Image (spheres, grey):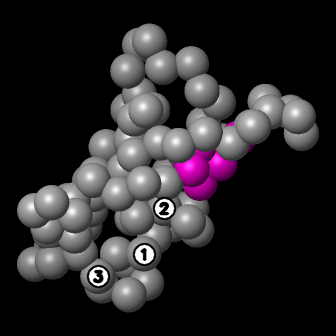
Amino acid sequence: MKWWKKSEGFYHFCPFFEYNLPPPTGSVAYEVFTSKKAYYGDESKQDIWKSDWFQMKNDDEADSRFFEYCLYARTYNYTLSVIWEK
């Protein structure tokens, strides 16, 4: 990842957000880069788990549903993912 930004009100711990690392496994961005599969139209918003992108607070915390909208620019070989909580 070359850059990232979180909203001011976003409180989840983001250990994966380090520069020049691949996207985390389980994320739509990772799927795009490993399989070159892109989602369009009604499939653009994909269900993911919180733990795909974020560290859980502790072992007792239940994983929860999040969404990832990943735009893929094939010509430039980059993606832009927007991630939000249900």
**Where does residue 36 sit, x and y in percent of width and height?**
30, 85
**As drawn, is 75 to the left or to the right of 16?**
left
User: In the image, what residue type sits under mark 3?
Assistant: Lys
**As drawn, is 8 to the left or to the right of 40?**
right
| Residue identifier under label 3 | 37
Pointer 1 with pointer 3, Cβ within 8 A: yes
Pointer 1 with pointer 2, Cβ within 8 A: yes
**Which quadrant holds the N terminus?**
bottom left
- Secondary structure category for the residue under label 3: loop
**Where does residue 60 sit, x and y in percent of width and height?**
88, 34
Q: Earlier in the sequence, mark 1 or mark 3?
A: 1
- Secondary structure category for the residue under label 2: loop
Outermost residue on the right side: it is 59
Please determine whether, in this image, residue 53 is positioned above or below residue 27. Answer: above
1 vs 71, nearest the viewer: 71
- What segment is highlighted magenta in the picture? 49-55
**Where does residue 24 sit, x and y in percent of width and height?**
57, 62
| Residue identifier under label 1 | 31
